[in-house]
């Protein structure tokens, strides 16, 4: 489970009488999960190392290096982290989050925003709102409001039968069934399944499944698994087949995707 590294680990962040509070969090070495829960305050989760994923009723979001997951106020969600994931958590009162996204999303964290977040985590809970600390918090919110979004997201259906299907595919992503065969698994015709998946997610079944493979592949690659291992786990015939799919969807092969983020992170740490 995540471990808070602020002055008062027992304090409920929702009870802190400040518009914004920031926490540094460290994770146990094994994988961990925070079960379904919600906060009154909106929340930003930024993994300084490792990868975090967040699931709500609407979808699944991934925060690889240089990205963070934004979770609006009162959204029921659960969070998962991989080995050695560390990072920061920023919590914002709803009335101070009106210029921020109103739905869960993955945000790109600029070097400036990362540094602001680290500085905010060093503040006492009850910082001086009218002094330098208050100005630091205000600048952080301004930068967060203009942070670009990263499309590392899997929309999740609300329809009960489709939700059951989505869970089956998440648990066994290597299974390669036809649309008709998947329909048989949940008691829907091929036509009904095709129509419902578009209505519920905005994607065809094929595109939805590819997006799922991208998210699951990114999680494995961030853990250090080889492309060959990822391809096998996701049911691809070869590593090159997975790389072609990834490049077509993301615009660059997975190796370059992570290399650029590692270089950016190393550059930030060297400053």
Image: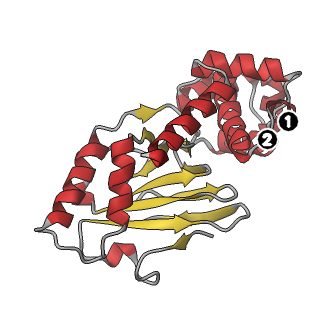
Q: Residue at x 78, y 36 (%)?
A: 187
Q: Quadrant of residue 27?
A: bottom right
Residue at the limit of the structure toward the left, as seen here: 130
Establish if 243 lies above or below 226.
Answer: above
Residue 207 vertical placement versus 45 (above, below): above
Q: Position of residue 198 (x, y in %)?
A: 58, 25
Q: Quadrant of the N terminus?
A: bottom right
* 19 relative to 53 in the view: left or right: left
Counting every numbered tag in the picture gives: 2
Colouring of the image: secondary structure
Residue 164 in the image: state x and y as whole percent: 71, 45
Could you say which is closer to the camera, residue 4 or residue 12? 4
The residue carrying mark 2 is: 225
Q: Residue at x 42, y 40 (%)?
A: 107
For label 2, the crowd category at 10 Å Cα-Cα, with few meaning under 14, some 14 to 19 and many 20 or more, is few
Q: Element under label 2? A: loop
Left-right relation of 83 to 92: right
Q: CA distance from mark 2 to mark 1?
A: 6 Å
> Can residue 49 be seen here?
yes
The local secondary structure at tag 1 comes to: helix
| Residue 110 on image: x %, y % | 38, 40
Q: Residue at x 57, y 42 (%)?
A: 64
Query: Is residue 235 or residue 240 the one in the foreground?
Result: 240
Residue plotted at (74% across, 42% down): 220
For residue 247, which quarter of the picture?
A: top right
Residue 236's spot in the image, x, y percent?
Answer: 84, 25
What crowding class fits label 1: few (fewer than 14 Cα within 10 Å), some (14-19), or many (20 or more)? some
According to the picture, the residue beneath numbered tag 1 turns out to be 229
Decide: marks 2, 1 in contact (CB < 8 A)? yes
């Amino acid at each position: 489970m995540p471990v808070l590294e602020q002055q008062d680990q027992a304090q409920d962040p929702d009870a802190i009488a400040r518009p914004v509070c920031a926490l540094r969090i460290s994770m146990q070495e094994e994988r961990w999960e925070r079960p379904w829960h919600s906060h009154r305050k909106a929340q930003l989760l930024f993994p300084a190392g490792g990868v975090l994923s967040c699931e709500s009723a609407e979808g699944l979001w991934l925060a690889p290096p240089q990205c963070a997951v934004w979770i609006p106020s009162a959204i029921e969600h659960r969070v998962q982290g991989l080995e050695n994931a560390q990072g920061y958590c920023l919590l914002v009162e709803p009335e101070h989050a009106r210029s921020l996204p109103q739905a869960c999303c993955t945000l790109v964290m600029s070097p400036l925003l990362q540094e602001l977040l680290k500085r905010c985590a060093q503040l006492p809970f009850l910082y001086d709102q009218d002094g330098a600390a208050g100005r630091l918090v205000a600048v952080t919110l301004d930068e967060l409001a203009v942070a670009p979004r990263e499309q590392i997201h899997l929309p999740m259906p609300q329809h009960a039968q489709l939700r059951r299907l989505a869970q089956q595919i998440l648990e066994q992503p290597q299974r390669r069934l036809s649309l008709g065969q998947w329909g048989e698994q949940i008691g829907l015709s091929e036509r009904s399944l095709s129509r419902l998946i578009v209505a519920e997610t905005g994607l065809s079944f094929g595109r939805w499944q590819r997006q799922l493979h991208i998210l699951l592949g990114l999680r494995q690659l961030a853990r250090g698994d080889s492309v060959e291992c990822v391809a096998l786990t996701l049911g691809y015939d070869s590593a090159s087949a997975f790389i072609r799919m990834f490049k077509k969807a993301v615009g660059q092969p997975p190796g370059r995707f992570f290399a650029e983020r590692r270089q950016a992170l190393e550059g930030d740490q060297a400053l």
